[in-house]
Image: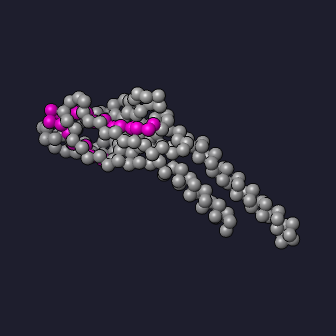
Amino acid sequence: MKTRTCCAVFAAVLGSVSLASAQVEPIFTGVPPGPPGIELVFPNHLPEHPDYKELTFIGIGQNNGWEFSSTLWVWFDWQLPGGGFDYSPPTSFTLAPFTGTPISTSYTIPFCPELVSIHFMTDSPVGASVSGEFSHICVPEPSSVALLGSGVILMGLLAHRRRRAAGRFRGDD
């Protein structure tokens, strides 16, 4: 029974580490024609020890009534620790006329910034529409999670060993 309790505590700790920093932003927006496009900025809820940031957008892009195919570009940017911004390479999607086009792109940043943005730009002369979810998740390095897990398991084993030794001392064995 005590082993199950230890495993339940370990699972709860791992779950809180990986899920506490997930943020999902619903996006429903129009994209005006040409540069600069549109930028949507979101603050982060920073965990105590993040090691990297995963940025993902999954959604649908659509021409706004244009009868020819057009291109939609999607990219991310983030605030650097010393100020300024850095950008991911843009990903392009061809928007077919009169139909929705699935859009899925992601990028990993080697740290967890305070601000992240997603950009959309199109060459359609009448603009485009985009809907979907932008998720940005601060994630601890897998080795950090493994180290945390091994520490919890070691503490459980030591506690179990102490209880066994105390039982032998009292003659309960």
> Magenta span has 89?
no
Near-viewer residue (36 or 128)? 36
Q: Is residue 91 visible?
A: yes
Q: Is residue 1 above or below residue 14?
A: below
- In magenta, the rendered stretch is 113-132
Quarter occupied by residue 156: bottom right
Residue for point 54% across, 50% down: 17
Residue for point 38% across, 48% down: 24
Residue for point 29% across, 36% down: 39
> Magenta span has 127?
yes
Q: Position of residue 90 (x, y in %)?
A: 33, 31
Which quadrant of the rendered structure holds the N terminus? Answer: bottom right
Quarter occupied by residue 97: top left
Q: Is residue 62 left or right of residue 134?
A: left
Q: Is residue 91 above or below residue 10?
A: above
Q: Is residue 98 left or right of residue 155?
A: left
Near-viewer residue (142 or 37)? 37
Q: Is residue 172 above or below residue 142?
A: below
Residue for point 78% across, 64% down: 163
Q: How many marks?
A: 0
State how the image is colored.
Answer: one colour
Q: Is residue 88 left or right of residue 93?
A: right
Q: Position of residue 110 (x, y in %)?
A: 49, 34
Q: Position of residue 8 (x, y in %)?
A: 60, 61
Q: Among all residues in the image, which is located at the extreme bottom?
A: 172
Which quadrant of the rendered structure holds the C terminus? Answer: bottom right
Q: Is residue 140 visible?
A: no
Q: Is residue 17 above or below residue 143?
A: below
Q: Position of residue 115 (x, y in %)?
A: 40, 38
> What is the magenta segment's predominant secondary structure?
strand
Q: Among all residues in the image, which is located at the extreme front?
A: 83
